[in-house]
Image (cartoon, helix red, strand yellow):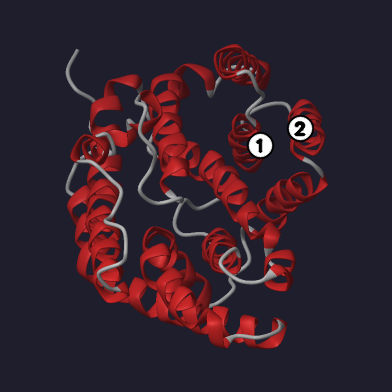
Amino acid sequence: MGHGRISIIEAMRGLAAASVALFHFSVQLDLAARDTFFYGWIGVDVFFVISGFVIPLSLYGRGYTILQFPQFMMRRLVRLEPPYLVSIILVLAVWHLSTLMTGPTASAPDYSWPQVASHLLYAVPLTPFSWVSPVYWSLAYEFVFYILTGLTFASLIRRPIEWTVLLAAAIAALLYWTEAGFDVCIVEFLIGIIVMRIATGEGNLARLLFWLCASIGVAFYAAGPWVGTAVGLAAAAILLLRDVQLGRWAIVAGSLSYSLYLTHTSVGMPIVDLAKTHAIGLPSEVALMVAALVASIGFAYLFSRLVERPSIRASRHIAMQPQAA
């Protein structure tokens, strides 16, 4: 199979980003809208499955070795970090602007510069601080996944899938004892990895299918039927539709997904907050959310062209050549 842009992946990225945005808009409104769009947050779970598939697939297509780890991480950082950092500035700017618009009785923005600094390299979970935007927590998971994948992919891709399952189980056990809970995100990354191995023919098909079904079953058990169904459908869509061309709309949706994910809280959420007193009933609330989503997509387009695309071009100039031993 080719390793270029896959239509179904791009479409899923765009839909996942839009669903997360609608979820964040809905929680600002009345009960009807919150109930209707409550499960939009599951778009993040779909993102984790996609990353579990795409990142190993990219390394597989490059014939990746552990000697390429520094270049791999540098490409990831150059590709993703500038838009993330600019979005933090945007969050703080909108925070201050909304305070000014509210009037002198409004409370000052509640953040500290050490808190902002802890966002560098997604270090907030290692500190007592909180994220300044509710979407950033998932980026920390992605960043750790990049590191683990870069360090282990070359040694695991030719081995039976059970080695990867064992590693995922060890990480899950470690997090369980340190955080007093099971983290289904690890299973979702694993689902993507298994789908990648099925798609590339790397491993025994029967065993891969067994572990795929088992992993989806764990997601059902640990996170509930909505999450289990979403990640199961994501895996099935990638396997069954990865060679189907969906048209340019899918590529456009995927190309805007990261910018939309980063910026919708700074664009759409203030729109909803300012206009929500005029939205009475589910139809008007949905119309308001759609307007906020359209505005967020428009801003994401500008953000993508001005910030994200230069980062993409810069990352492509980092050659993935192994360093001399």
- Residue at position x 60%, y 40% in the image: 196
According to the picture, the residue beneath numbered tag 1 turns out to be 191
- Residue at position x 19%, y 12% in the image: 325
Choose between 275 and 166: the one closer to the eye. Answer: 275
Question: Is residue 82 toward the left or the right of residue 283 in the image?
Answer: left
Q: Secondary structure at mark 2?
A: helix
Q: Residues within 10 Å of mark 1 (few under 14, many from 20)?
A: many
Picture mark count: 2
Q: Residue 27's x, y, as percent?
A: 60, 63
- Residue at position x 30%, y 67% in the image: 105
According to the picture, the residue beneath numbered tag 2 turns out to be 222
Q: Does residue 55 lie above or below 128 as drawn? A: below
Q: Does residue 95 lie above or below 272 as drawn? A: above
Q: CA distance from mark 2 to mark 1?
A: 14 Å
> Looking at numbered disc 2 in the image, what kind of residue is underneath it?
Ala
Q: Residue 156's x, y, as percent?
A: 53, 19
